[in-house]
Amino acid sequence: MDYQSLAELLFPNVNKTPADLEAEFPPRALAEGAKVTRFAPSPTGFVHFGGLFPTTVAERLAHQSGGVLYLRIEDTDARREVAGAAEGLIKTLSRYGINFDEGAVLDADGKVSDKGIYGPYKQSLRGPIYHVYAKQLVKEGKAYPCFTAQDELEEILSVNKKEELKHTDWQAEAESRRREMLKAREITLDEVKANLEAGNPFVLRILADGEPDRKVKFTDLVKGNMEIPENDEDFVLLKSDGIPTYHFAHAVDDHLMGTTHVIRGEEWLPSLAKHLQLFRYLGFKTPKYLHIAQIMRLDENGNKKKLSKRDMGANMDDYTRMGYCPEAVCEYVMTLLNSNYEEWRMQNPDKSYLEFPFNIKKMSVSGCLFDFDKLNDVSKNVISRMDAQTVTSAVTEWALEFDRPFGELLRDNKDMATAIFAIGRGGKKPRKDLATWCDAKPYMGFFFDEYFAVECPYPDKFPKEDILNVFDGFLSTYDERDDMNVWFEKIKAVAEVNGYTPDMKAYKANPEAFKGNVADVSMFLRLAVTGKMNSPDMYSVMQILGKEKVAERINKMRSKL
Ligand code: GLU
């Protein structure tokens, strides 16, 4: 076969050569060790938690090494594209600290545009670039047109379909396709001409040189050393509309854009032999690969399941609605990504997660388990380290969007809200009441009459009379100017007079000797003032509410008893 003529027949309008493109997109001038990574999503909808995962790795590796993180939009499958998805994902990722240095970015009007010299960064705009390399492969006898095979056959063999089809069906399909391909390999120049003249569409296939019983050695930076069977499948490089498949676009784009580390889901591992073959055919240096295991969750029966699109916690936009702060989600992702992260955090409670020395070697080879309880734990810690102003503005901003009346109340009482969130903050053992901004209202709504409600009655064992006596005793001596010690001494005195001992030790030794203890007396006051059995520090609560409100609530409770 005269490959040169075949290439001209198939790509008559392609005039550039790979050398032209290499000159147009020269290798990046990078400092030693600087990594170039990318996020390459198909704009098919929302950002999945499972997408934030590899992207955080990509971000950390690039920015920790003084390298480049870029965004490439893989929109070659127009059927799956969702309008506005790219804009949405750029915004969502930026909430989670993923900011791209290059690639598809949002311009001033909020539209996606290119930044950087290695573009276009949208695959649908890179057609001419792919065709240059496709022509080259044909010229070298490494790719050939296939007029008979249809794109649907590709789909049949796609990973999902393979699972759906019974094994035997799949083998029969594979065999029939193999026969098609072998036939197509034999095509003559005249047959190509005739087909083109008749306007028949063709796909461009690689001419695979692999033998499945031979193995390629390969090192994945997460999974370690592996041996994979060589690729013997003449897979499609260009579909009949001239648009490249993922495989071909991956090789061309990651080469020309200078990616040093490809970080992607492990669902791509079965295609790796194809990619290695393609890089070799194209004469490109193979990038380093990190294949990241899928995120798992436990189902109702305690079995591990893939975190699927529809699962709670999959859609990153859900986190905003649920009131998770991005810092907490990022922190949680870090705990899942590096096994020594939590230890580092304990030693460095005040540092940003960005200061953590992220290490590929500490990544889990098998799937990480997604778990809301753990996320909430991490989140409580993160929020407990924030200052009161930060918490106040975050809760207010969140509530203005998702719980308007509460948001307006906080906005109109900003100083009071800040004082409330300051209770128990700072110091070695800060309070950990909030895992999400949603938790704020149940925690501190009682400060506002709009949300004040007595949650439960007094336990029956306490005589009404005692409670009323405590109210009287407390109100007759309460002075807002008292410091916390004086305030508490007064409560102790009220307790004692009423037969409730202030001496907890004595109470524990002989509970029968007393009606109760000072904690019970505090509870009488707490339930009246906050409506709850548990509340932040009562002294601070009363200081913020002010004497009048404290007395009003106690009196209201008195009239209800
Ligand atoms: N577009 C591919 C995907 O969304 C990208 C995989 C990769 O990172 O190379 O799965």
Image (cartoon, rainbow, N blue to C red):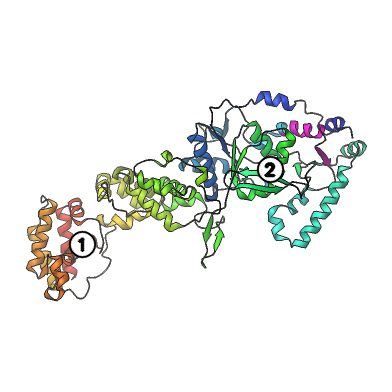
**Dot 2: what SS?**
helix
Q: Which residue is mark 2?
A: 246
At horizontal 71% and vertical 56% (from top left) the residue drawn is: 161
Q: Nearer the viewer, residue 487 or 546?
A: 487
Measured as percent of width and height from the top left, residue 268 is found at 65, 48
Measured as percent of width and height from the top left, residue 265 is found at 60, 48
Residue 218 as seen in the image, left or right of residue 477: right
Splitting the image into 4 quarters, where does residue 560 fall?
bottom left
Measured as percent of width and height from the top left, residue 266 is found at 61, 49
Q: Nearer the viewer, residue 472 or 307?
A: 307
Look at the image and say whether residue 148 sits in the magenta stretch: yes
Residue type indicated by callout 1: Arg
Which numbered disc flags the more N-terminal residue, 2 or 1?
Answer: 2
Q: Nearer the viewer, residue 188 or 400?
A: 188
Mark 1: few, some, or many residues within 10 Å (few <14, many ≥20)? many
Q: Which mark is residue 526?
A: 1
Q: Is mark 2 within 8 Å of ligand 1?
A: yes
Quadrant in the picture for the N terminus: top right
